[in-house]
Image (cartoon, grey):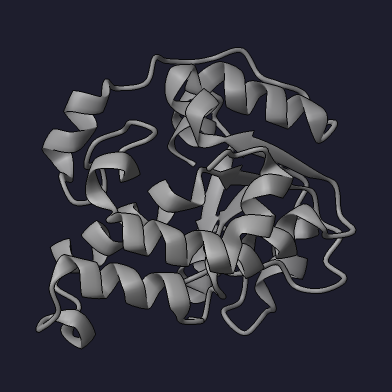
Amino acid sequence: MLTLHRVFGFKKGLSANPAKTLEKFGLPADRELLPALTALDETVFLKTHRPANPGDTAPAIYLVRDGRDSVVSLAHYRRGRGHSAIKDLDFDAVLERIITRRTANGTWSENVRSWTDRPGRTAVVRFERLIDDPAAALGGAVDVLGLEVPKPRVELPSFEELRARDPVMFRRGKAGTWRTEMSPELEELFWELHGSQMEALGYER
């Protein structure tokens, strides 16, 4: 979302805060968010962590990464933000809970499938490519959606600058960190529950 907004100049909104997003575009707070934004004459990218709605045909960019990195990152994020539900759990216990339990966002596999199997046009961007060249990765995704790719306006701040602003959100910025942060037992559990989706994406054990 940062690249789409700062580099290419696309407008953005948050599904988690529909009233504020609607207000930002001068729309009544009681409107349904997605149809209201779709009716605008300008392109708006709406950030969400939720699974795709069945039957939703709006164009979308979906960021996917190795599921093991994803759950490790989320475990660190929740501990770093001090979520009350996990305050008495150690890291491995938090990680096991994320691997096994369904949340409002679904399990990792459910969330991925909801976006990659949806009827709407979806440009899938891999995290590994995003961190290597974010402007090229997202510019290519915008092109896949049939939108005009604007000329980049500015360069993105470095990962070090982003980490200085928010070290919980921007923790390591690398792929494959699960190798040193996930126990063999938890990787086995993850693969048992999510292996078919990992293979579908081309990630190897």
**Vertical placement of 11 versus 191: above or below?**
above
For the point 75% across and 72% down, the residue is: 53
**Vertical placement of 3 versus 149: above or below?**
below
How many marks do you count on the picture?
0
For the point 20% across and 77% down, the residue is: 83
- Left or right, residue 93 beside residue 201: left
Q: Position of residue 32 (x, y in %)?
A: 69, 78
- Left or right, residue 194 beside residue 80: right
Q: Position of residue 51 (x, y in %)?
A: 64, 69
- Left or right, residue 27 beside residue 77: right
Q: Position of residue 69 (x, y in %)?
A: 39, 47
For the point 70% across and 22% down, the residue is: 140
Residue 159 shows in the view = yes
Viewer-proximal residue among 143 and 87: 87
For the point 13% across and 72% down, the residue is: 90
Identify the image quadrant of residue 177: top left
Residue 147 shows in the view = no
Q: Position of residue 101 (x, y in %)?
A: 46, 81
